[in-house]
Amino acid sequence: MNSDILQHSQSIEIKKRIHSIDIMRGLVILIMILDHVRERFFLHHQVSDPMDLTTTDPALFWSRFAAHLCAPTFIFLTGLSAYLYSQPRQGKPRDASAFLFKRGIFLIVLEITLICFSWLGTLSTLYLQVIWAIGLSMIALAVLIKLPKYLLLMIGLAIVFGHNLLTQIHFNPEEIGYSLWTILHDRGYLITNSVVNVKVSYPVLPWIGVIILGYLAGPLYQQTAALRQKNLLKLALFCLSTFAVLRGFNLYGETLDWQIQAHCYQTLMDIFNLTKYPPSLNFLLITGSMMFAGLYLFERFPANWHRFIQTFGSVPMFVYILHLYVLLILYMLGQLIWGNNQGIYFGVNHISWIWLITLLLIAALYKPVAWFSQYKRKHQYVWLKYL
C-alpha cells in the first residue's frame, strides 16, 4: 500500500516537472510570436545588434529585449529534453545520440526549405536562423555526448564563459577559415552572387555551449521537487549576480560598455543593450537567470492559466511553422489591400499595433494548436516526435 502511494506521488511529481518545462517553452513561444509580428509588420523600424539607443523607442527596445529570452531557452531546454529522453521514466536508459543527430538533420532541412520560404515567399536567399542553430547544436551534442560528464561540463563552461575572448578574430571572405568562422562565430554570407545565396544569421558556437549545459542540467529533474526548486532558484540568482558584477562594472562579457545616459531610463536600456549575434556571455547570463526563475516559479506556484501557455509549449515546432505561414499570408493580404505603406514595406505605424496583432494572433492560433497537441498525445507515430 505504501509502495503504491509512493509510486503515485512520484508519478504526479514527474507530470508537474514536465509541465513546468512545457510552460516555460510555451512562454517563450508566445514572446517569439510577438517578435515575429514585429519583424513582419514593423520592419521599417529596424533594430541593430546591439540596438541603437538614439533611434530605438523604449517600447520597441523592451519588446525586442523580451525576445532575447527565446533562443537561449529553446536551446537549453533542447539539451535538457535530450537528457530526459535518455533517462525514460520506465525502462532502461537509452542512447540519445542517434535521435539528436537525426533530429538535428531534420531541423536543418526544415530551416532551408519550409521556414526560409515562410519569411520571404521565395528561396533566393537562405537565412540560417534559430532552427538551424538548434539543429547544428543537436548534432554537436550527439557527437560530444559520449564524453565523460566532467569533460563535457568543462567544454560547455569554456564555450559559454570564454567565447567573448574570440570577438577580435575575423576572417575576410577570401581567406581560408572564413566559412567555418562564419558558421561558428561571425554573422555573414557563405554564398553570394549565386542563384541561391546563403547567410548565417545565428553563429552557432555559443549555442553549442548552451545545449551542453542544458543536457548536463537534466539530473535536476531526477531530484525531489523541493530540492530541484531550490537549485533552480540558486541557478537564477547565480546568473543574475554574475551578470550584475560583470556588466555592472563593465568587466567582461559584452562587446560594448554601458555608459551613463541623459535619462535614467536610457541608462537602464544601455545596461541591458546586449549582443545576440553571437550571444555574449552577459546576454546568456541575464536570459539564463530569467529562464531558471521561470522554471522555478511555474513549478513552485502552479496556476490554471499556465495550461493555456503549456498548450503552446507542448508542440513548439508545429506552432513555429504555423504562425510563420499565417504571418506570411496576413502580410501578403495587407500588401494587396493597402500596398507598401511604409516605404518598401507594408506595416503599422506604432508598436502598440504589434502588441494588439500579437494578442489576436495568439487567440486565433490556440484552437488549432490545442487540437494538434491532443492529436500528438493520442498517437505514437514516429514523425510526431519531430514536432
Image: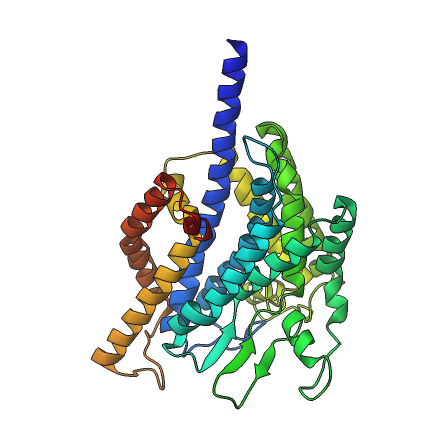
Q: Is residue 229 above or below residue 235?
A: above
Q: Quadrant of residue 51?
A: bottom right
Give the x, y percent position of residue 123. 42, 79
Position of residue 210 in the picture relative to residue 27 (left or right)? right
Give the x, y percent position of residue 284. 63, 57
**Camera sees residue 211:** yes
Position of residue 52 in the picture relative to residue 338 (left or right)? right
Q: How is the image coloured?
A: rainbow
Q: Is residue 93 above or below residue 352?
A: above
Looking at the picture, tell me which residue is in the foreground, 227 or 12. 12
Query: At x 52% / y 65%, what residue is drawn?
Result: 108
Give the x, y percent position of residue 66. 49, 59
**Camera sees residue 58:** no
Position of residue 356 in the picture relative to residue 242 (left or right)? left
Q: Residue furthest top?
A: 1
Q: Is residue 295 above or below residue 122?
A: above
Query: At x 78% / y 52%, what residue is drawn?
Result: 154
Q: Residue furthest left?
A: 337
Looking at the picture, tell me which residue is in the foreground, 383 or 354. 383
Query: At x 30% / y 73%, what residue is drawn?
Result: 331
Q: Quadrant of residue 43?
A: bottom left
| Number of marks present in the image shown | 0
Looking at the picture, tell me which residue is in the foreground, 381 or 40. 381
Query: At x 68% / y 75%, what residue is drawn?
Result: 180
Give the x, y percent position of residue 367. 27, 49
